[in-house]
């Protein structure tokens, strides 16, 4: 099995900790290792290091090497710039084209998700082998914990096997009523953005459903093979449509399967989401050791300084060398607006 | 006129900015000068520098000299250690005994109060001249803005003159019902802790109402005069009762007057009190220039860093080199508990 880890995100959701030069996947926000390190570690015993590939942006390649020195240098696939998941996966397939057997299975994983139960995660990869071998594009559907409106959903249809279903359809992010209905029906799962497929299956799916990308991938393969220059591919890559693979291929393909999983997954999309999965003390506070708290509950605090909280609840407080964020937990996703504004104002020192 | 400024407070209310080594009166929290500098500045044109005396703790003498280099060195009266206002004022009188005419008037002022309208303040000192000349102990009663439970009150009795009243009685800090009643009656004022009296009047009042202190003051005068060593007075000073002058003398004396004043006074007893008198922006936030605020109102923020607030209201946020305080405004007085705990835990680096 090959693992392809997508690590090109620019990460504005964890400002002021995440910066242009240090996006989420390189932060130690979900443990004592960075998220990309945890993602690779999770594959131990299932995928050898030499079969783990990372696709990342040019600007992050050095960071990837720094965080994952154990991987062969040639396993880092470099996007000239961030596009979306269809071009990114397509580019990776072009890179792998002459390096692996086309009969090989590939698991595609984002570098910045949390999965608590590694055992169950690895088990789900085994479950995917059979449908993938039969030419299915396999997805992993998260058993929903609440009627989330921030995720797409996968509607499971008929059984493929005891623990795997055919995909009936993909659903875009729903409104709250629709999401509540999904949960009542019981056969809807969050779209995790993780995939499992044979090289052959997905490569042919590109040819069939995204022929424009497919043609450009041939050009890129030609450049790599005969000119051996990375710079040359940028002009080709930029021509691709910036389409997510869910829309470009998954929604259109015929043989699709979904494996429902419930292994403590989170895409950790906001400070609140991180707070929700972080260990807290008896008052629900996530806070450093140097603290003094009076009547304060359910706060998420990141600072190396001594901190005192008095009579405040449900805050996110993040201090870095040059900035402080203080947000209500519920509004912490709006940090994106902060980054947008700083970007518009060209306050590069804060980005 | 002599001014005696009491500057011995240890200041735990503005932690983490105020520290043992830097109490409130030395902080620039109410302007671009320290509170003690503003207190001296307020007397300009009314009292010459050479007639302004500062009584302060040994540990703060150097800071006083640093903040007020224009005052003669001998105008700094040093308490061996902090006691309360009766011993402190008594000690100052002993110090002044051989230095000024006993017919001289003295205005006694705390070093850490805010008074917005300097003109009215100076006017009130003039009003105090006549009753003081007639042997009255004159107090300044703040026209109350709300039924405060954190201040003592002065009940005004019969008129002494157009703008001055005899004091009927002093009232300790009331409960909210009592305070509301005071405001309805209209002849109650907040006890500001500022006084105006002739040297002779107050010295004799000590003899009459606090004979124990009075006798010890004679001893101290003897030590200063004949032994000229500061160290020797500590053993005497420590024997004094730790009594506020309001209780020790003002409540007992017969000739007392109160001048109602309404010149934008605040004792700035908490971060909230400071927030209340600080200039804010259109969202009610007091915040540095380097900020980005989304739906956040009425916050009081002190940091040199770039700060972003999202969806938070009525917070006090104070950042120093080694500590951060985040408190609801209403609870900001509880910072005293933080300091108490740090003291009990001997966390001297934070005190």
Image: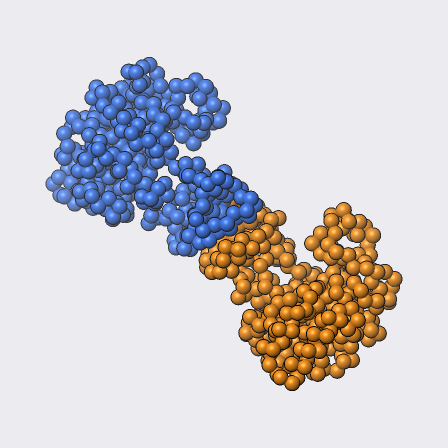
Chain colours: A blue, B orange
State left or right for residue A161 relative to residue A350: left
Q: Residue furthest bottom?
A: B226
Tell me which residue sits at (33%, 14%) in the image: A158
Tell me which residue sits at (46%, 41%) in the image: A281
Nearer to me, B22 or A131: B22
Q: Is residue A255 above or below residue B295?
A: above
Tell me which residue sits at (76%, 46%) in the image: B177
Q: How many discs appear?
A: 0
Tell me which residue sits at (37%, 47%) in the image: A18
Residue B81 falls in image quadrant: bottom right
Nearer to me, A187 or B15: B15
Residue A88 visible in the displayed image: no
Query: Residue A289 at x, y = what percent?
Result: 43, 49
Q: Residue furthest right?
A: B158
Q: Is residue A240 above or below residue B190?
A: above
State left or right for residue B198 relative to residue A199: right
Nearer to me, B328 or B296: B328
Query: Residue B152 at x, y = what percent?
Result: 73, 57
Q: Is residue B201 above or below residue A97?
A: below
Query: Residue B344 at x, y = what percent?
Result: 53, 55
Q: Residue furthest top?
A: A158
State left or right for residue A14 relative to residue A68: right
| Quadrant in which the N terminus of chain A appears | top left
Query: Residue B107 at x, y = what percent?
Result: 72, 72
State left or right for residue B215 relative to residue B185: left
Nearer to me, B347 or A255: B347
Q: Is residue A334 above or below residue A260?
A: below
Residue B11 visible in the displayed image: yes
């Amino acid at each position: 099995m090959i693992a392809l880890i997508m690590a090109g995100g620019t990460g504005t959701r964890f400002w002021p900790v995440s910066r242009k030069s240090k996006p989420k996947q390189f932060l130690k926000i979900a443990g004592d290792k960075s998220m990309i390190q945890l993602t690779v570690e999770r594959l131990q015993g299932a995928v050898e290091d030499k079969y783990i590939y990372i696709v990342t942006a040019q600007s992050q390649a050095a960071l990837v090497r720094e965080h994952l020195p154990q991987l062969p240098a040639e396993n880092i696939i470099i996007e000239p710039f961030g596009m979306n998941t269809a071009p990114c996966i397509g580019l990776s397939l072009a890179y792998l084209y002459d390096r692996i057997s086309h009969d090989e299975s590939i698991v595609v994983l984002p570098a910045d998700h949390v999965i608590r139960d590694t055992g169950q995660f690895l088990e789900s990869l085994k479950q995917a082998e059979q449908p993938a071998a039969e030419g299915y594009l396999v997805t992993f559907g998260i058993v929903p914990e609440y009627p989330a409106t921030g995720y797409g959903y996968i509607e499971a249809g008929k059984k493929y096997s005891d623990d795997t279903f055919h995909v009936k359809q993909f659903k875009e992010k729903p409104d709250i009523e629709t999401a509540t209905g999904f949960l009542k029906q019981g056969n809807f799962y969050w779209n995790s953005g993780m995939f499992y497929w044979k090289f052959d299956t997905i490569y042919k799916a590109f040819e069939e459903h995204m022929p424009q990308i497919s043609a450009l991938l041939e050009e890129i393969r030609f450049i790599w093979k005969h000119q051996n220059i990375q710079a040359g591919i940028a002009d080709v890559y930029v021509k691709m449509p910036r389409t997510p693979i869910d829309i470009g291929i998954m929604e259109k393909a015929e043989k699709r399967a979904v494996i429902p999983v419930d292994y403590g997954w989170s895409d950790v999309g906001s400070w609140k989401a991180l707070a929700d999965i972080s260990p807290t003390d008896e008052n629900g506070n996530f806070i450093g050791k140097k603290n003094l708290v009076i009547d304060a509950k359910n706060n998420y605090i990141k600072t190396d300084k001594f901190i005192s909280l008095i009579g405040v609840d449900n805050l996110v407080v993040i201090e870095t060398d040059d900035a402080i964020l203080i947000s209500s937990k519920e509004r912490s996703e709006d940090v994106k607006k902060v980054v947008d504004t700083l970007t518009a104002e060209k306050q590069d020192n804060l980005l």
